[in-house]
Amino acid sequence: MKFTIKYMFILLALIGMSSCEDYLDINENPNVATKPPLAGLLAVTTYRTGINQFSVGSNTSFYTQYLASPNAGLGSDVYEQVDLSGTWNTIYDVMSDIFDLIKLAEEGGSTELAGAGKLLMAANLALLVDMWGNVPYSDAFTGKNIIPKYDEAQGLYSTVLSLIAEGRADIQKPNSTSTIAKNEKSDFLLGGKKDNWLKFSYALEARYLNHFSKQGNYNPTAILAAVSNSFTSSAEQAQVKAFDVRNPWANVARNNANLVLGGWLSEQFVDALNGNTFGVVDPRLAKITTPLPDGTFVGTPNGAGRRGDGTKKLETYLDNSRAYASDNSPLFVFTFAELKFIEAEAALTSAPARALEAFLAGIKAHMADVGVSAEDAQAYIDAAYPNLTAATLTKDLIMKEKYVAMFLHPEAWVDARRFDYKYKDFTLPANAELNEFIRRVQYPTVEITRNRQNVPIINSLAERIFWDK
């Protein structure tokens, strides 16, 4: 796919100018085509769905304490009401293009592409709900209302699941006038493989059903049924691997090397892998960052800022030569490892042997994703879990390993809230503005300014999204 990337980004720019039905855009340019090509829409929506993982994760990774600010008491690190207007706009811009993709594909009989669009819409809509709760959707893309109403979060989750079911059905309809396979070079997420789009639909279903773990309608049987129809290996997982210049996390690492500070690893995350918290060194840490000159790995305490005066390296951070932040590292949207940990959690009570098998498979899959050899992965498992059986596997262990496997991913903040932040030695940031862990974000300034009459009032960032209650 790489040899087409520059040409695709010309299409991305053109598509970005043609989203006339986005409620974020008021004026319409008569010189821009109102019916962009489906291939271009598929390119921009699959690519930018991946980029949205970075856009959201660059904020939520402070809440999950993967990252920490090198400056004391700064922004997301201490639960300030940070303005996320850019992230909000980015997600809605993509959803506007997805809306166009679905509409134009349905009008032209391209049912496979319409189905793919519905899956992309579900994934992006869920990102919004998991961050903000109630958000505009049903009234947002018609072009008739620039101050749309807000839909209830719980109802929007029903919409997410309906979009997944509809998307799956559309992909399987016969006689699509344009197919996913014919648009392989425009599919930055799953490489034009129809079967993998179907498996992706089941992965999404399993993920969002699993979000109800605190609710009375939690249904492990339905989750496990979806898992059984989803990815069977990491080769099938949803990820963006081609970029116009480089992976955006690589920009963070490069900027940090040039003293535009960012991407510093949290003490909580580093200690979970360097042996301090659990007594076993996790080989994934050396694949994510480089050690200090003395061979140790040290993280930055959230909220407290860096150690020393900055004249020498005393902490570790994202490295442009390592996993996640190299120029060509993939942006993970949905991994096989995530699927296995969902399976382990859902099967824990009813099928503990299946849960154990999935738990170990999840560890090994993530180890492989970041470049750890199979031998080193097994050595870690043997050291960390020498006496583990199906009977002794616990949710705490599943969430511990899933936390590592979801590094930098927005879904990790959903897990932290579902798990009530009960990770071992997890503590509030120094100088935190809340006396409890953060549960949501404030609505962005851009939305409060333009749609004030509809924006819900948020009294505290400790207020919970419906599935977190």
Image (cartoon, rainbow, N blue to C red):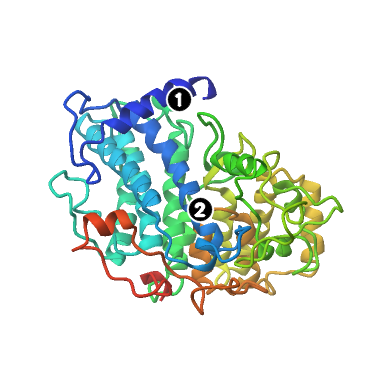
Q: Which residue is denoted by mark 2 in the rendering?
A: 57
Q: Does residue 119 appear anywhere in the picture?
A: no
Marks 1 and 2 in Cβ contact (< 8 Å): no
Gap between marks 1 and 2 measured at Cα: 26 Å
Q: Is residue 19 left or right of residue 387?
A: left
Answer few, some or many: residues within 10 Å of disc 1's Cα (few below 14, many 20 plus, some between 14 and 19): some
* SS of the residue under disc 2: helix
* First-in-chain label (1 vs 2): 2
Identified at 45% across, 25% down, the residue is: 185
Query: Looking at the image, which is closer to me, 268 or 215?
Result: 268
Task: From the image, tell me which residue sits under label 1.
Answer: 185
The amino acid at mark 1 is Lys
Check the image and name the residue furthest to the bottom.
Answer: 435
* x then y, percent, for residue 369: 65, 44
Up-down: is 51 above or below 125? above
Up-down: is 109 above or below 255? above
User: Which residue ends up furthest to the right in the rendered image?
Assistant: 294
Residue depth check, mark 1 versus mark 2: number of the one nearer the observer: 2
Q: Secondary structure at mark 1?
A: helix
**Percent x, y for residue 10?**
39, 23
Q: Identify the residue at horizontal 19%, vertical 23% (top origin).
A: 31
329 left or right of 131 in image = right
Q: Residue 432 appears at what percent x and percent y?
A: 54, 73
* Residue closest to the far left: 144
Residue at 31%, 66% in the rendered image: 154
Of 127 and 252, the residue lying toward us: 252
Kindly identify the residue that appears in the image at 73 percent across and 64 percent down: 271
**Amino acid type, mark 2:** Gly
